[in-house]
Amino acid sequence: MAAKKTITVEQVGSPIRRPESQRKVLVGLGLNKMHRRRTLEDTPAVRGMVNKIPHLVKIVDEA
């Protein structure tokens, strides 16, 4: 069985003065404070969430 692919995302933007939907996407990714990192399974759902807020997060590592 192959190892699951993961991506590491880091929050680089503040949710202050952003729409509520963008804040909810951050919380859904497990982020809520600046410069926090989360390693998540690389799925289309996670990629879609990251693509909704490219100005608030960056992909640090893809494994």
Image: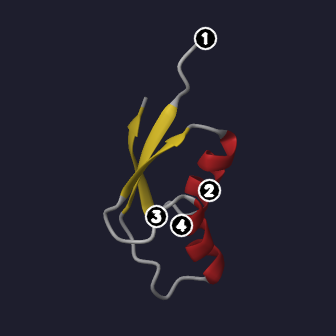
| Residue 53 falls in image quadrant | bottom right
What's under tag 1, amino acid-wise?
Met
Can you identify the residue that label 2 sits on? 49
Residue at 60 percent across and 66 percent down: it is 25
At label 4, the amino acid type is Leu
Q: Tell me which label, 1 or 4, sits earlier in the chain.
A: 1
Say which of 19 and 42 sits in front: 42
| Mark 4 nearby-residue class (10 Å; few <14, some 14–19, many ≥20) | many
Q: Tag 1, which secondary structure?
A: loop
Label 1: few (<14), some or many (≥20) within 10 Å? few
Mark before the other along the chain sequence, 2 or 1: 1
Query: Horizontal and vertical percent for residue 32?
Result: 44, 71
Q: Residue at x 68, y 41 (%)?
A: 44
Asked if the residue at tag 1 contacts the one at tag 2, i.e. Cβ–Cβ closer than 8 Å, the answer is: no
Q: Earlier in the sequence, mark 4 or mark 2?
A: 4
Pointer 4 or 3: first along the chain: 4
Q: Would you identify the image quadrant in which residue 12 lies? A: bottom left
Residue 31, numbered label = 3
**Callout 3 crowding tier (Cα within 10 Å): few <14, some 14–19, many ≥20:** some
Residue at mark 4: 26
State if disc 3 and disc 4 touch (CB < 8 Å): yes
